[in-house]
Image (cartoon, grey):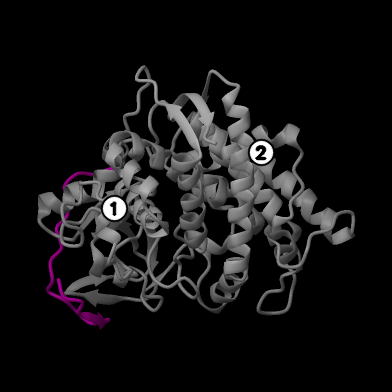
Amino acid sequence: MSSVIQQGGSTTGKIPREKGLDQTLALLREGYEFISNRCGLFQSDIFETRLMGEKVICMSGEEAARIFYNPRLFQRKGTAPKRVQKTLFGESAIQTMDGAAHEHRKQLFMSLMTPERIGMLKDLTQQYFAIAGYDWEGKKAVILFDEMQQILCKAACKWAGVPLNEAEVEKRAGDFGKMVDAFGAVGPRHWQGRRARKRTEKWIRKVIEYFRSGKIQAPEGTALHAMATYRDTEGKPLSVQMAAVELINILRPIVAIATYFTFCALALYEFPKTREQIVAGNEEDLYMFVQEVRRYYPFGPFLGARVHSGFQWNGVPFNKGQLVLLDVYGTNHDPRLWDDPFLFWPERFRNWKGGLFDLIPQGGGDFHTGHRCAGELVTIEVLKTGLSFLTKQLEYNVPDTQNVSVSLTRMPTLPESRFIIDQIKLTP
């Protein structure tokens, strides 16, 4: 599909339209495959449907992603539903901003993602892995996902300069996890996420206040120092609440890496030959495996934006204010981009040049000025560290009495058992 964009004007282009009053229940039933199912049915990368009573355009593929991340055409303001802001992002956070204000705030986040700072986080993660390994040796079994949330919560807070007592690690890690788990949820999971966010914001507001009053210290370059001292495009500091929201937007995604790490463990179990390649391999083998985990396993199902001003793409009209969803899962499994996309094959990344709009598990486009997740580089490096520990420093058994199936209808998803391991030993 060619990328022909026209601003305004009339059009005779037709877009497939799904029949029915509303497809919200179908989205909940089909989950990650909702958009790709319809793209296949309509034989089109784009179609119109109705969700939560609103007309929505859904798109999939590399060219769709390229259009979706054009800041002249789309904006994030007014896109994230309040239910998502009140659980996952926080209200008025960076994910809801556009233009110069977004770029300025994005540079704040990117300033924390220097090679030196990422290296420090990797070192901390490695230290907490080693400590956890000694603890696991004395246990009959552990739930890997739960353990990873706690490891990453401790590493993230230490790295960010946020005080965290050992006695509260499980609670804080669990709350970060509930905030993520509330995405796409209705009922109890949603309300658990809202309560978790309230508790977390209350905690981090106090941390911001203590720092600003001098009761606690944090080195320059840490996330706590950066958020508490940041000034916006008008030279104004963030309110205590806003500083807390953005600091949480540093901590929460690091804890959320536990999901990808659990999928790494699942991949080692489901595709045992890959373990042999990693053990005998080098840094590149770790990188390829991590990238394939991020491509192959489901993380975010789709992303949303609203049309900034009217335009046409390939004759299809996009009207100002219209909600558009980009198919993340489907794009990561698009056979035009990935040979045999439902085959787990890390080798596909050996000579991969790195596109901005094909591998999009955490968003697409440019890191520094666009809406691609600032934490993607952190995710890759932390996963490489964890994967090295899991394959080269730990021996364990995966009991077959558990359920490791992954549902594509639950958003977000995990192995059903959250991946249990036993007979754990640190290697000499």
Determine which quarter of the picture holds residue 16. Answer: bottom left
Q: Is residue 178 visible?
A: no
User: In the figure, 153 relative to 111: above or below?
Assistant: above
Badge 2 density bin: few <14, some 14–19, many ≥20, Cα 10 Å = many
Q: Which mark is residue 346?
A: 1
User: In the figure, 372 relative to 342: above or below?
Assistant: below
Q: Quadrant of the N terminus?
A: bottom left
Residue at 89% in and 59% down: 214
Magenta stretch: includes residue 12 = yes
Q: Which residue is mark 2?
A: 172
- Characterize the magenta stretch by its predominant secondary structure: loop
Residue at 38% in and 49% down: 300
**Residue type at mark 1?**
Pro
- Is residue 408 toward the left or the right of residue 95 in the image? left
Residue range (magenta): 1-23
Q: Earlier in the sequence, mark 1 or mark 2?
A: 2
Residue at 31% in and 76% down: 310
The local secondary structure at tag 1 comes to helix
**Residue 56, percent across and down?**
29, 56
Residue at 29% in and 52% down: 346
